[in-house]
């Protein structure tokens, strides 16, 4: 339980009892045991964990409660913007899933944070889908820039529906971040069972999250199915896939070209487009290990 609090403490994010149960952390090598809220409360009391306004945190870290509460209040506007644009993009027949990811998925984004979306497309329509979505946002000046990111939409992770297993970009036993990233995805649009399939294809996350940690259905800010009249566009999108690929690859910035397919941060192929140049997962893993060592020394 301390491991779970320690992980979320990296992001100034205290947890409720139900959240601790949902995100209870394993060690990456063996699955942790699931426990109920009462057992968690008793265990946390025994080790002197702090609690304020229903949120539990590591000793001496009570200040993060107000940080979470402030960020939660900021999240509504960002969620509304994300949902509005998901409502636009869902009409593309190639789009199968749109989900809020990263800090906003936990309502933990700062005032100046952008809005990160994860997109699943039909096979063979990855590049054209990205071109349409990113192109529209670019024309409307709604993409984040080096000087302006607040409330702008960042579309940096696309996969096709036949490539939902994210093991190829998992960094290994120390990479708890990707497991939590998957568990905290907030679906805005699901064309039909895609989120469930994503979870089923990534059972390796159970080594980190035995309960699965998934969003409860009532919490999903979902939109309805796309309009039928756009479905005839699907064959056209397939025809445009190759030119869309060529067009975008010629315009990749130097930092993307330098990192492309040389690690697991920037992955470019016909099944996955992942543009995380500043992939901080290794840093999160290092800080997490240091925090666990510190907790053991205190104990």
Image: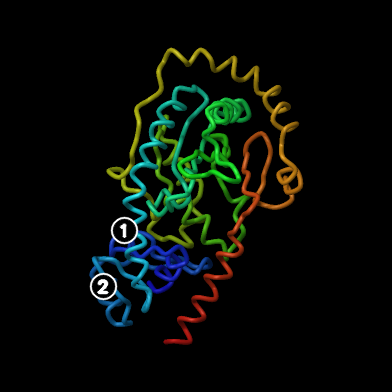
- Are the residues flagged by discs 2 and 1 in contact, CB closer than 8 Å? no
- Which residue is located at x 36 percent, y 62 percent? 67
Q: Position of residue 78 (x, y in %)?
A: 39, 42
Q: Residue furthest front?
A: 147
Image quarter in which the N terminus is found? bottom left
Of the residues tagged 2 and 1, which is closer to the observer? 1
Q: Position of residue 228 (x, y in %)?
A: 41, 15
User: Horizontally, is 195 left or right of 120 in the view?
Assistant: left
Query: How many numbered discs sit on the rendered protein?
Result: 2
The local secondary structure at tag 1 comes to: helix
Is tag 2's residue or tag 1's residue first in the polypeptide sequence? 2
Circle 1 residue: 69
* The quadrant where residue 34 appears: bottom left
* The quadrant where residue 24 appears: bottom left
User: Residue 87 versus residue 125: which sits nearer the camera?
Assistant: 87
Q: Residues within 10 Å of mark 1 (few under 14, many from 20)?
A: some
Above or below, comparing residue 255 to residue 86 in the picture: below
User: Residue 57 versus residue 38: which sits nearer the camera?
Assistant: 57
Circle 2 residue: 41
- Which residue is located at x 47 percent, y 83 percent? 296
Q: Position of residue 109 (x, y in %)?
A: 43, 52
* The quadrant where residue 257 appears: top right
Q: Position of residue 169 (x, y in %)?
A: 62, 51
Image quarter in which the C terminus is found? bottom left
Question: Marks 2/1: CA distance?
Answer: 21 Å
Q: How is the image coloured?
A: rainbow
Above or below, comparing residue 297 to residue 243 in the picture: below
Q: Residues within 10 Å of mark 2 (few under 14, many from 20)?
A: some
The local secondary structure at tag 2 comes to: helix
- Which residue is located at x 38 percent, y 74 percent? 61
Instruction: Return the mark for residue 206.
Output: none
Above or below, comparing residue 21 to residue 115 in the picture: below
């Amino acid at each position: 339980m301390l491991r779970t609090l320690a992980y979320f403490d990296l992001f100034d994010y205290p947890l409720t009892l139900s959240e601790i149960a949902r995100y209870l952390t394993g060690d990456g090598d063996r699955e942790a045991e699931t426990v109920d809220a009462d057992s968690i409360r008793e265990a946390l009391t025994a080790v002197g964990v702090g609690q304020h306004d229903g949120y539990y945190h590591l000793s001496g870290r009570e200040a993060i409660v107000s940080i979470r509460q402030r960020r939660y209040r900021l999240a509504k506007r960002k969620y509304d913007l994300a949902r509005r644009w998901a409502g636009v993009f869902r009409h593309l027949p190639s789009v199968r899933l749109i989900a809020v990811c990263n800090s906003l998925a936990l309502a933990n984004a700062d005032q100046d944070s952008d809005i990160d979306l994860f997109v699943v497309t039909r096979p063979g329509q990855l590049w054209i889908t990205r071109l349409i979505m990113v192109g529209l946002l670019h024309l409307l000046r709604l993409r984040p820039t080096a000087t302006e990111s607040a409330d702008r939409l960042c579309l940096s992770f696309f996969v096709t529906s036949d490539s939902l297993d994210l093991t190829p970009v998992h960094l290994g036993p120390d990479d708890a971040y990707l497991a939590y990233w998957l568990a905290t995805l907030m679906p805005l649009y699901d064309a039909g069972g895609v989120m469930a399939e994503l979870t089923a294809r990534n059972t390796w996350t159970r080594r980190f999250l035995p309960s699965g940690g998934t969003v409860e259905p009532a919490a999903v800010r979902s939109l309805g199915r796309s309009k039928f009249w756009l479905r005839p566009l699907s064959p056209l999108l397939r025809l445009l896939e190759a030119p869309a690929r060529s067009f975008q690859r010629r315009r990749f910035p130097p930092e993307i070209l330098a990192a492309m397919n040389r690690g697991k941060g920037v992955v470019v192929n016909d099944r996955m487009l992942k543009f995380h140049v500043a992939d901080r997962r290794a840093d999160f893993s290092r800080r997490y290990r240091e925090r666990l060592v510190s907790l053991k020394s205190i104990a």
